[in-house]
Amino acid sequence: MTTTWDLMALLMLIGAVWGSFLNVCIHRIPAEENVVVTPSHCPKCQQRIAWYDLIPILSWLILGGRCRHCQERISLVYPLVEFTAALLTVATLHHFGINQTGIALTILGYALITLTVIDLYHYILPDVITLPGIALGLICTWIPGFNPPMAHWQDAWIGVIAGGGGLWLFGWLFQRITGKEGMGLGDVKLTAMLGAWLGWKALPFTIFAAAVIGSVVGLLWIALSGRDRTLPIPFGPYLALGAWGYLHFGPMVYSWYLGRPLVLF
Ligand SMILES: [Zn+2]
């Protein structure tokens, strides 16, 4: 008989393995390299990495965070992504169940981890993730068997058009008034993607939470590191965090605010 702990350990392991694939996507998508065909190699010495050096989290610890061949430092981001993916897999499947909805939301989580790290490194949210993400969210609304918080098809379309469009309009007005670019098109597409998956009702919470967390982190960053305030601050990671907050706490916060349960369907 499988105990809950066995199951959780198995899900962590599966999540960590997916995390190592997300690392591949994070480093190759911005460079427009193939994420499937090319074998893993050290970015510095180009040596091919053996399977026993590709074990999520463990290999990094065993190698002391350095390449086996050239001793180049391997970023802490690699094991962190694997660990985050492992935790996200367990948390999501525990919260929403090991079913169609839980698995779909886990995949959404993987996309958000990938987008977050790419945005932090490069200030971009690649179309190759967000555009298929919008399509996949809309396709899910036509497949029977998905439960809330995944969107009903009408809420999904309103989310894409009003959510994406609203953020685009906000960015356009901001730029008109201040002369600075406030919102990238990548942020608009990510918002549309979140609308497609979670429906327009998720967006006020998500965008508000993103703005609050983003402002606090941005101000702390400037205060603590003396970071130049004219540098761009990526918004994608905060949208991703806001959406994740909505998944776990959104309906609770809405029902407190509205004084009645939020009807998702
Ligand atoms: Zn190397």
Image: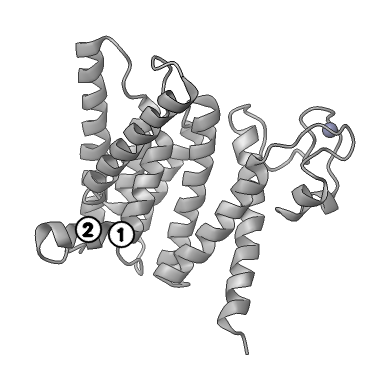
Pick out the residue farthest to the right. Answer: 69
Residue located at (56% from left, 54% from top): 85
Q: Amino acid at mark 1?
A: Phe
Report if residue 174 is visible in the image: yes
Q: Which residue is mark 2?
A: 253
Q: Position of residue 67 (x, y in %)?
A: 83, 38
Q: In which quadrant of the rendered view does residue 168 lie?
A: top left
Q: Residues within 10 Å of mark 1 (few under 14, many from 20)?
A: few
User: How far apart in space, not on screen, are marks 2 and 1 (Cα)?
Assistant: 6 Å
Report if residue 138 is visible in the image: no
What secondary structure is found at the residue carrying circle 1?
Answer: helix
Residue located at (52% from left, 50% from top): 110
Q: Residues within 10 Å of mark 2 (few under 14, many from 20)?
A: some
Q: Quadrant of ligand 1?
A: top right
User: In the picture, which quadrant includes the N terminus?
Assistant: bottom right
Q: Is mark 2 within 8 Å of ligand 1?
A: no
* Image position of 253 (left or right of 53): left
Residue nearer the viewer, 256 or 35: 256
What secondary structure is found at the residue carrying circle 2?
Answer: helix
Q: Which residue is mark 1?
A: 249
Q: Position of residue 98 (x, y in %)?
A: 48, 72
Q: Amino acid at mark 2?
A: Val
Q: Is residue 146 above or below residue 210?
A: below
Q: Position of residue 191 (x, y in %)?
A: 32, 39
Q: In which quadrant of the rendered view does residue 32 lie?
A: top right
